Amino acid sequence: MWIPTEYSQAFVMLLCSMLCWGSWANAPKLMQGCRFELFYWDYVFGTTVISIVLAFTLGTFGSAGPAFLEDLRSASASSIGYAFAGGVVFNIANILLTAAIEVAGLAVAFPVGVGLSIIIGVVLNYLITPKNDPLLLFGGVVLLLGAIVTDALAFRAHGGAGTRKTTSTGLLLCVVSGVGLGLFYPLVAKSIAAPRHLGPYSVGVVFMLGMLVSNLFVNTFVMLKPVTGQPPLPLSLYFKMPARWHILGLVIGGAVWGVGTVLNFVGSSTTLVGPATSFALGDGATMVSAIWGIAVWGEFRGAAPRVRRMLVWMFVLFLCGLGSIALSPVLTTL
């Protein structure tokens, strides 16, 4: 398999991961009128397919470790189990976060759900694999959280979906999804750190299979019993979707997110970075999504001067946080 040997290579991979994680959600925006539950089937199929493609290419050629199939055969049951469980936990949490956005709005769901996931994920990942300068790492995380909160406040001030009344159901969904999103990456870190562990490309395949298997049950249930108050969806509607929607879901949604996830796992597995830094940089994707919303989708078009100032501060906090996290591996090695 191919693994980066220099920090510059690993950092570029993690930046690509952040861009992918922050860009896949453009697919639902391009599928106006499609319920998220229907899109989510193609999204999960796309992540699974692209992880297998990467496993048989980058995960097979190279001199950094065993090829994909050999790596899979020699791995311990515990390593495989942790990777699969990580996919299951992520899938459940991601669906609940989407429901939380529908019920509570972005201005509540992102600070609570994503903010909680960053805190839990970085702390647990650092405890599992304590790498990189903790002051720069956790300082950068605080700055990223500040950027997320500032973005949410700007969205609320602009009169977005965050102005809706937050119910106890919405808040509960935010908390549960945030905990789940914070726990999935430590499971991946445990898989990579286990005896006779999987390589990162194999982890990607097993992780995506965990998403796929759990989705058969979780998404089917959510379609039949929506927690957002919307009417139930029969599974037959998936097969009636336009071909264009399926392509967008598979490629712009699933494949883009899947590439970002596997690249993040590869960066995490190196001795140069570690899972805490890899997860923290990846979660900068929230701000990438905000950039798409501002620059392409016009979500803040006509914003008041006060809102525009908040957006400027959001980007300042984001760039400072990103820089602090990026420097944490470099200064550790000096």
Image: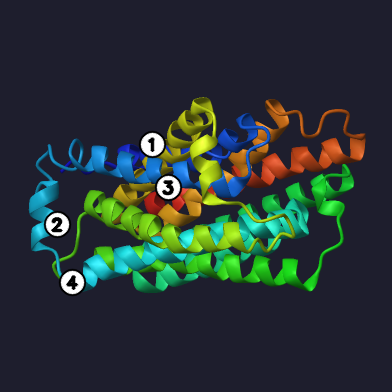
Closer-to-camera residue (127/194): 194
Between discs 4 and 2, the one toward the N terminus? 2
- In the picture of the structure, the residue carrying the numbered disc 4 is 77
Q: Residue at x 35, y 53 (%)?
A: 208
Which label's residue is closer to the chain start, 3 or 4?
3
Per the model, the C-alpha gap separating discs 1 and 3 is 25 Å
Q: Amino acid at mark 4?
A: Ala
Q: Position of residue 11 (x, y in %)?
A: 38, 41
CB contact under 8 Å: marks 1 and 3: no
User: Which is more foreground, mark 1 or mark 2?
Assistant: 2
Amino acid type assigned to the residue bearing label 2 in the image = Leu
**Do the CB atoms of the residues marked 2 and 3 lie less than 8 Å apart?**
no
Q: Are marks 1 and 4 in contact (CB under 8 Å)?
A: no
User: From the viewer's perspective, is 113 left or right of 210?
Assistant: right
Residue 145 x/y as whole percent: 65, 57
Query: Closer to the observer: label 2 or label 3?
Result: 3
Residue at image position (25%, 52%) is: 200
Amino acid carrying label 1: it is Val
Query: On the image, which quarter does residue 254 sit in?
Result: top left
Q: Which residue is mark 3?
A: 44
Measured Cα–Cα span from mark 4 to mark 2: 10 Å
Figure quadrant of residue 17? top left
- Mark 2: few, some, or many residues within 10 Å (few <14, many ≥20)? many
Q: Identify the amino acid type marked 3.
A: Val
Secondary structure, mark 4, is helix
